[in-house]
Image (cartoon, rainbow, N blue to C red):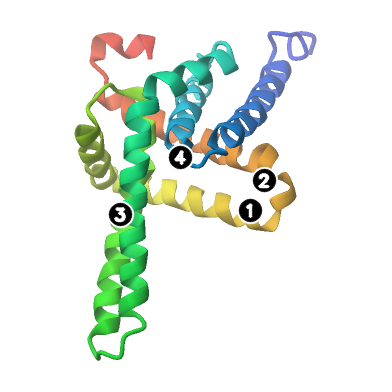
Amino acid sequence: MDKFFSTEGKFFRGLEKIVNVVYLNILWIIFSLPIITIGASTTALFSVMMKLARDREGYIFQGFWKAFKENFKQSTLIWLIDMAIATFLVADMYFFFNVEWSSGRYIGMIFIGVTVIFILGLLYMFPLQAQFENKVKQTIRNAFFLASKHFSYSVLLLFILLLTIFLMYLFWYIAGWCIIGIGAFVSAHIYNRIFKKYIPEELRDEY
């Protein structure tokens, strides 16, 4: 019992994780406020969150800030590309579902399918940017590859995202404190499990 409540015990270690998840949640919101920085902020969030899930987090703010700075350029470019694609897809769906053509709704349904595929790929882009060094084009390609290769995990990640958004809607007054962070922390365990398969075997013990 004494060991359980010691500073190295499970109780305090769990409490520390909760505090760190809340802290990362708040950092993500603050660094995302300019909107254009959401990509870099999300990359930094998952960079630290995946380490937290592996008990290798270190200093939270220093880790977040370091990942934010190092990935700012590429993450921002990915974010801008994603926003351009999302705008195009939403505009097309709105158009085809509101035209009077008999085939309009069918085309709209096709765009819904394309949007789902896009979202599944999007789920991997910033965690990949956080974990691996690649050019933007390769990171985007790898994201869609992993989304299809690990489809069951992709569906689970999508469910976690939708559940997080739903809980934010229901409990908006605490969303800024922990809901986003909890969703990211749960997702981080899945990303770790997937990414470990693509890390050279001699480096996996350090992962």
Position of the N terminus, as image quadrant, is top right
Which of pointers 3 and 4 lies earlier in the amino acid sequence?
4
Identify residue type, mark 3.
Answer: Ile
> x%, y% of residue 50?
46, 25
- Separation of marks 2 and 1 at Cα, in angstroms: 8 Å
Task: Determine whether the residue tagged by mark 3 lies in a helix, strand or loop.
Answer: helix
Q: Residue 175: give its label.
A: 2
- Separation of marks 4 and 2 at Cα, in angstroms: 21 Å
Quadrant in the rendering for residue 88: bottom left
Q: Is residue 117 or residue 84 the one in the foreground? A: 84
Which of pointers 1 and 3 lies earlier in the amino acid sequence?
3
Task: Determine whether the residue tagged by mark 2 lies in a helix, strand or loop.
Answer: helix
Q: Are marks 4 and 2 in contact (CB under 8 Å)?
A: no
Residue 189 can be seen in this image: no
Quadrant in the rendering for residue 39: top left
* Mark 3 vs mark 2: in front: 3
Q: Residues within 10 Å of mark 1 (few under 14, many from 20)?
A: some
- Separation of marks 1 and 3 at Cα, in angstroms: 26 Å
> x%, y% of residue 196?
32, 24
